[in-house]
Amino acid sequence: MLQGMSLSSWHIDCHVHSSCYSPCSRLRPEQACRLASERGLGAIVFTEHQIQWPQADLQILRSRSPGLAIYSGLELSLAEGFDIVCLLPEIDLQLPYGLSLDALEHALAPFGDEVFCFVAHPFRFLDRWDPDLDRMAPLLHGVEMNSVNILRGQACWEGDRLLPCRHELYRQLADTGLVQMFNSDAHLAEAIGTVSTRISLAHQDIPADTGELAALFRQHPRTYEHQNTNSLWPLVAGTAGI
């Protein structure tokens, strides 16, 4: 753990894509880090598609952003049609597209308790429970409850906050015992800081690497959503269903 950096409230975005390793992103990593710091985040996790950031590149990025905790996971698209974000030790991992659940379980087995997996935007394209979610249960530790991509086309107002219109399905999945995650799923600069996970770190230090971050979330901390609605609304307004 990094010493001397404990905070009473820590804001982290665990789902960010950069243009370096995700062709779908227009967000430069240095830009993402600068904006994260400017917009009040304490940490971000780069979760590129099928690939974890090389350790050497990650260390360079960290040296250029000393006030921000930076981690590297990866987002995996499975044969079953779901996307899973995995936080695990920084080993330059790459896995093929369309991996089966069984193959993913085998690939992650060596890391034991140093892995934290959450399902990303599970009901983005589904309006009902899918039986494959039950099959995924042994691999999952968390569920992404809100993000820019979740809200596109299915955003509803609840008071002064934006929730997915299929919020009850997300709640049903979270009620199986999963940690609730709130992320931007940023591919654009405008998305950084719009949605993040807030947790209390009053009595512990900030994780020094992604393996420690996974262990932190494996402890099932109480999480809360931070939402900058003023910045979030323009990204999801005007799409189908709004």
Image: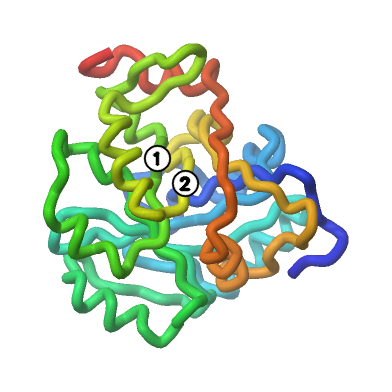
Would you say 166 lies left or right of 213 here? left
User: In which image quadrant can residue 77 be found?
Assistant: bottom left
How crowded pointer 1 is (Cα within 10 Å; few <14, some 14-19, many 20+) is rated as many
Mark pair 1, 2: CA separation: 6 Å
Viewer can see residue 14: yes
Which amino acid type corresponds to the residue marked 1 in the rendered image?
Answer: Met
Viewer can see residue 34: no
**Circle nearer the N terminus (1, 2):** 1
Residue at point 48%, 12% (across, down):
159
How crowded pointer 2 is (Cα within 10 Å; few <14, some 14-19, many 20+) is rated as many
Q: Where is residue 12 in the image (x, y as percent from the top left)?
A: 60, 47
Residue at point 14%, 38% (across, down):
128
Would you say 155 lies left or right of 222 here? left
**Label 1 with label 2: CB-CB less than 8 Å:** yes
Residue 181: numbered disc: 2
Label 1 sits on residue: 145
Is 7 placed above or below 207 here? Answer: above
